[in-house]
Image (tube, rainbow, N blue to C red):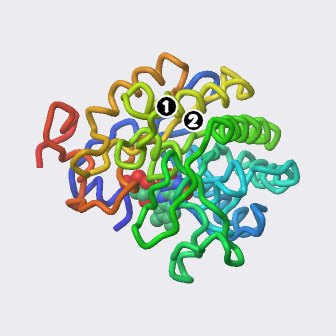
Amino acid sequence: MPLLSIFASKNINMPNLFSPLKIKNTEFRNRIVVSPMCEYSSDDGFATNWHLVHLGSRAVGGAALVLTEAIAVSPEGRISYGDTGIYKDAHIDKLKEINEFIQSQGALSGTQLAHAGRKASHELPWNGNAQIPSNQPNGWKAVAPSAIPFDAKEEAPLALDKAGIEKVKADFKAAAARTLAAGFDVIEIHAAHGYLIHEFYSPLSNQRTDEYGGSFDNRIRLLLEVVESVQQVWPADKPLFVRISSTDWTEGGWTIDDSVAPAAILKDKGVDLVDCSSAGNVLAKIPLKPGYRWSLPGPLAKPASLPAR
Ligand SMILES: Cc1cc2nc3c(=O)[nH]c(=O)nc-3n(C[C@H](O)[C@H](O)[C@H](O)COP(=O)(O)O)c2cc1C
């Protein structure tokens, strides 16, 4: 069902959907954002005409902001060998061309900077999605906070040491500089769906005993440091978003209440929007139904403006 029909059938009142919004110095022509969607259609990270058409047609369609798929900050940070990347200067030209088209249609262009962590090195979905072991063609060693695989049948990732963590931060910073050079209007940092940053803040995947593991403050450290790394090169007057998984949907994991404190810290740091998704770090049983992200028990269960259901 088209998104707007779902809103209509659920009687969700969205009076401002078509009114402009200003974030910092950037004007959004309405409130419609195209969610990041992996296309698995790149070779060595290079965007192609596929991306020009996929993203460009959403700009023609009237969205205010078109976000690219999760775009890898390093080759080892790709989910698959088909992911788009921004880990080489040579990636910039095609992304620039795509951005110029999107912007010529009155839309803004954004990218989602990502590192897949232990969920890297997988087959394309239409080839079955399985992990590609590091010793196989198109495979590489995945990295993570701890040497715990996503699935017990998979090869365990390498637990990042300090130098590895510093490289991750440097990769995000270099990617943000290329993002600027490519003419993007918005950066979203991907800290959701069981990818590297989420793996650090979730106790289910982080069993470290150093300053990046254990306590809550330690587990959110990488998230905050990646934000700071990006901010070193991304202008303070340009929108910066962060996508989190606001719950692991699993006993002992990250919860919606855990998401509140980092959201406040991110706001103080100059992050403009926390894009609240959920799950992806473990195989959880999610009670899927329309609006399920708003149906959780507890004080944050339902924004007051939403109708009862
Ligand atoms: C084909 C496909 C690819 C996706 N790729 C990404 C991605 O690269 N990054 C991301 O954060 N979410 C990704 N998602 C999730 C979507 O951005 C979106 O959050 C999800 O479809 C749920 O929609 P909602 O956010 O409107 O509830 C993908 C979804 C689909 C269907």
- Look at mark 2 in the image and give the residue it sits on: 28
Q: Residue 245 at x, y = what percent?
A: 39, 45
Q: CA distance from mark 1 to mark 2?
A: 42 Å
Residue 148: assigned label: none
Quadrant of residue 16 within the rendered picture: top left
Q: Residue at x 56, y 38 (%)?
A: 29
Residue extending furthest toward the front = 209
User: In this view of the protein, can residue 11 be seen by the observer?
Assistant: yes
Which badge, 1 or 2, comes first in the chain's sequence? Answer: 2
Q: Residue 107 at x, y = what percent?
A: 64, 45
On screen, residue 66 above or below 244: below
On screen, residue 105 above or below 263: below
Judge left or right: residue 214 versus residue 176. Answer: left
User: In this view of the protein, can residue 107 be seen by the observer?
Assistant: no
Amino acid type for the residue under numbered disc 2? Phe
Amino acid type for the residue under numbered disc 1? Asp
Judge left or right: residue 150 versus residue 14. Answer: right
Judge left or right: residue 95 versus residue 78. Answer: right
Q: Residue at x 41, y 25 (%)?
A: 217
On screen, residue 7 above or below 182: below
Quadrant of residue 244 within the rendered picture: top left
Q: Residue at x 57, y 40 (%)?
A: 189
- Look at mark 1 in the image and give the residue it sits on: 210
Q: Residue 213 at x, y = what percent?
A: 44, 34
Q: Is the residue indicated by label 1 positioned so its CB lies within 8 Å of ligand 1?
A: no
Q: Residue 302 at x, y = what percent?
A: 19, 38
Disc 1 crowd rating (10 Å Cα; few below 14, some 14-19, many 20+) is few
